[in-house]
């Protein structure tokens, strides 16, 4: 009788250990599609029309085959961030001059916004495209998220003050995502409702795919995290050929890896 509990304990230990090993070795192996050389300083991604967006020597570029469009604005300094969510209204953010430039699909300037000239004081440290002629803006003066109507030149605060500094943020039309310095993950919708999404893994770079999924890199390895309905998590290592991950971008099941010399595109299955 005394041997049975020992065997049961051994089997439980074995299967638990086996499950942990399996959990640690979940992998996604994407299929290479294409690669091409680049001299860009930064790769920003693709739009649904197949154009790639890059920055070289502080010049914003839109490229497809031999078709190249460029925009530069020396007077506003360095481009801090480019939002290509809407390829018909591209957002270039120049943080040093507290300004934004909106471009059309041929990179002609639609309008230029200087937040320092707004009636309500704004010091923008994050900007992204939202809906209905509005921009997401994080105002460092009051540590709140707001929406700026660039046609009416009006700004309204939508969130309560953030309690921690922003480590990373990402926007879509309806959502402002951010991760604070403690790796807590949140989002705010256009009505100001803020939701906690838990903690993210330690990362060097990250791209949020949804409130339940994100891709991140750590120590030149690439991972995909999937948060299930029951709250459990699966972390997959994404096996790519590149040993140095300057930047990655995932959209429509296409994973693009940017190194200082080339851009490689993979087909990846993400449920």
Image (tube, helix red, strand yellow):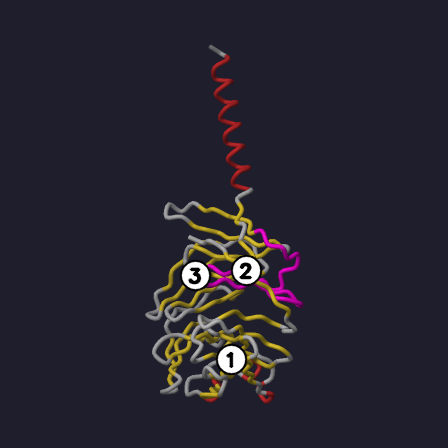
Going 65% across and 73% down the picture, which residue do you hit?
A: 39
Task: Say which of marks 3 and 2 sits in front.
Answer: 2
Q: Which mark is residue 82?
A: none
Cα–Cα span, label 1 and label 2: 30 Å
Figure check: 173 above or below 228? below
Which of marks 3 and 1 precedes in the sequence? 1
Tag 1's secondary structure?
strand
Which of the numbered marks, if any, corresponds to residue 92? 1
Label at residue 186: 3
Residue under pointer 2: 33
Residue 68 among those drawn in magenta: no
Which sits in the foreground, 128 or 139? 128
- Which class describes the residues within 10 Å of circle 2: few (<14), some (14-19), or many (20+)? few
Look at the image and give the residue range highlighted in magenta: 239-265
Q: Position of residue 65 (x, y in %)?
A: 55, 75
At 66% from the left and 59% from the top, the residue drawn is 244
Judged from this view, the residue extending furthest toward the front is 66
Evaluate if marks 3 and 2 touch, with contact meaning CB atoms under 8 Å apart: no
């Amino acid at each position: 009788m005394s041997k049975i509990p020992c065997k049961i304990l051994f089997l439980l230990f074995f299967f638990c250990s086996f499950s942990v090993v399996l959990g640690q070795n979940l992998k996604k192996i994407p299929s290479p599609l294409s690669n091409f050389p680049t001299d860009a300083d930064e790769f920003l991604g693709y739009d649904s029309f197949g154009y790639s967006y890059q920055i070289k020597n502080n010049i914003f570029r839109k490229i497809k085959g031999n078709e190249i469009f460029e925009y530069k604005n020396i007077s506003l300094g360095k481009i801090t961030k480019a939002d290509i969510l809407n390829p018909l209204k591209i957002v270039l953010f120049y943080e040093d001059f507290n300004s934004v430039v909106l471009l059309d699909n041929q990179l002609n300037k639609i309008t230029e916004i200087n937040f320092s000239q707004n009636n309500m004081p704004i010091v923008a440290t994050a900007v992204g495209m939202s809906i209905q002629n509005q921009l997401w803006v994080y105002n460092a003066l009051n540590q709140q998220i707001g929406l700026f109507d660039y046609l009416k030149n009006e700004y309204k605060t939508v969130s309560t003050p953030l309690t921690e500094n922003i480590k990373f943020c990402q926007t879509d039309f309806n959502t402002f995502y951010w991760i604070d310095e403690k790796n807590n993950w949140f989002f705010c919708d256009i009505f100001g409702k803020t939701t906690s999404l838990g903690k993210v893994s330690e990362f060097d770079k990250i791209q949020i795919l949804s409130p339940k999924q994100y891709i991140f890199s750590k120590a030149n390895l690439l991972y995909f995290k999937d948060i299930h309905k029951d709250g459990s998590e699966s972390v997959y290592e994404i096996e790519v050929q590149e040993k140095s991950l300057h930047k990655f971008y995932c959209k429509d099941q296409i994973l693009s890896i940017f190194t200082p010399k080339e851009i490689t595109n993979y087909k990846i299955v993400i449920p």
